[in-house]
Amino acid sequence: MKNIAVLISGGGSNLQSIIDAIESREIKGKISVVISNKENAYGLERARKHNIKAVFLNDEREIINELKKNEVDLIVLAGFLKILSSEFTNSFENKIINIHPSLIPSFCGKGFYGLKVHQAAIDYGVKVSGATVHFVDENADTGAIIAQDTVEVYPEDSAEDLQKKVLEIEHKILKKVVKDFCDDKIRKKDRVVFIDK
Ligand code: GRF
């Protein structure tokens, strides 16, 4: 059974979708630890409610040590708002995934997080947006794309309206990727990711 670590900085609704999918046996894996770089992140509370080890760590070296101590097979960045060094990403190559609330390569990279992503999409006038799960490499939001799904954007939508629609898609595609990773169905060739049926 794969050991999963989830790194958060906020509310943890993506974390919750993984917890629920594990408890319903949809995902054959175990969350060994939830780490937040924000001491008051509600996601830590979500983990504790499900008897999952939840720790506040803000120092990258301490985070790396905690991950190694838990012998994690998969690291899920779920609203983790800290840029990881190349030492970190190289230590866990092809084992770190991130959920981003747009269709990468649009509206991503430095400075694109939270509501800012959706406001940029609204201001651009896109008709479709969505979410992306991707491998994490040493740059922001540039790793190979694993899964994407879309939502329609209406002219009257606010950034909050779009955020709400996209968050539902995030929960769906993130838990599917975690499931596929735990089932060893994901392979990567250069930038192209294959998921076995
Ligand atoms: C999500 O929108 C995710 O795409 C972004 O941060 C947000 C985290 O939300 N990276 P939550 O903490 O999982 O509710």
Image (cartoon, rainbow, N blue to C red):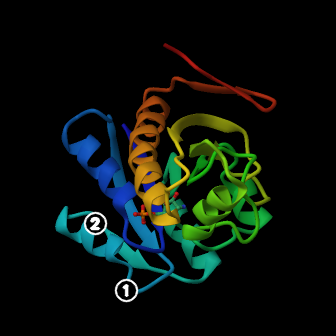
Q: Nearer the viewer, mark 2 or mark 1?
A: 1
Which numbered marker is on residue 55? none
Neighbours of disc 2 within 10 Å: few (<14), some (14-19), many (20+): many
Residue position for label 2: 47
Residue 152, horizontal then vertical, whole percent: 51, 40
Residue 138, horizontal then vertical, whole percent: 78, 58
Drawn side of residue 155 relative to residue 30, left or right: right
* Residue appearing at x 70%, y 46% in the figure: 104
91 w.r.t. 145: above or below:
below
Q: Would you say residue 104 is visible in this rendering?
A: yes
Residue position for label 1: 40
* Residue appearing at x 46%, y 47% in the figure: 170
Residue 172, horizontal then vertical, whole percent: 39, 40
Drawn side of residue 44 relative to residue 50, left or right: right
Label 1: state its secondary structure.
loop
Drawn side of residue 47 relative to residue 148, left or right: left
Label 2: state its secondary structure.
helix
The one of 73 and 78 positioned closer to us in this rendering: 78
Mark 2 beta carbon near ligand 1 (under 8 Å): no
Residue 27, horizontal then vertical, whole percent: 32, 36
* Residue appearing at x 68%, y 61% in the figure: 123
On the image, which quarter does residue 116 sit in?
Answer: bottom right
Pick out the residue farthest to the front: 156
Pick out the residue farthest to the top: 197
The one of 189 and 160 positioned closer to us in this rendering: 160
Query: How many marks can you see?
Result: 2
Q: Would you say residue 70 is visible in this rendering?
A: no
Q: Amino acid at mark 1?
A: Asn
Q: CA distance from mark 2 to mark 1?
A: 13 Å
Q: Earlier in the sequence, mark 2 or mark 1?
A: 1
